[in-house]
Image (cartoon, helix red, strand yellow):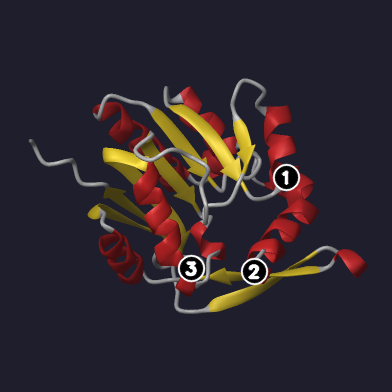
Amino acid sequence: MMTWLSDTRDSYDAAAVGYAEETRDLLDRLLHVRAGVVLFAELVRAIGGGPVADVGCGPGHTTALLRELGADAFGIDLSPVMIEIARREHPGARFDVGSMTDLELADDSLAGVLAWWSLIYIPDEAVPGVLGQFLRVLRPGGVLAVGFHVGNESMTETTGDGDQRVQTSVHHRQPSRVADWLREAGFTVEAQHLLNPDGPKPGAILFGRRPAAPPR
């Protein structure tokens, strides 16, 4: 396994319990972020619904909200401990251990993919491959929403203590750069929402779509 991938997994395994508690009401506090989830669910509904993958789902709070909104959502996360917590806290939903670098999903099988502050752990050189995975599993006309930190730097986060101490790189990016990557992967970019642009922790959400198949 690539070092950055195993570091991310180990970091979230170590922090899973505290992270699940800290983020339990996050979408109730960050209403602009919640609105992005609601809009994503509406966009999926507008194309007739279908399976939706919350990729990098963590403890499953966002997956649960999607299901409350009527989406046929399931979660995927690299961290087995996160998935254990998600299954325990949201027993009615499906949660799988997996990596966005190699999704174990059939081609054209999803109506939507949500990557909610999970692409931030993917280094630049691996982003095109991840977006290619998203495009592959979406059916024509399928919806993608990507949320991320805005900036121009990569930061190192340290999790755990002693022998369990793990460092993970977190990448902050400009929306224009992420939009260019989406277009290069084959997506149409439909909307860009800036979050807290005047604050200390700006973010952004990009909504994209796999182009519909041309008529025969």
Residue 130: where, in percent of width, then height?
Answer: 45, 58
Q: Amino acid at mark 3?
A: Ala
x 26%, y 47%: residue: 210
Residue 145 in view (yes/no): no
Q: Nearer the viewer, residue 44 or 127?
A: 127
The crowding category of the residue bearing disc 2, from other C-alpha atoms within 10 Å (few below 14, some 14 to 19, many at least 20), is some
Q: Which residue is at the far right? A: 162
For residue 10, what is the image quadrant?
bottom right
**Label placed on residue 80:** 1
Q: How many marks?
A: 3
Circle 3/circle 1 CB separation < 8 Å: no
On screen, residue 8 versus residue 200, left or right, reads right
Residue 212 vertical placement versus 178 (above, below): above
Which badge, 2 or 1, is on the more N-terminal residue? 2
Where residue 35 sits: x, y (%)?
39, 40
> Residue 126 shows which numbered tag?
3
Q: Which mark is residue 4?
A: 2
Labelled disc at residue 211: none
Give the percent coordinates (x, y) of residue 146: 41, 53
Q: Residue at x 49, y 50 (%)?
A: 116
Q: What amino acid is found at the position of numbered circle 1 in the picture? A: Pro
Proximity of marks 3 and 2: CB atoms separated by less than 8 Å: yes
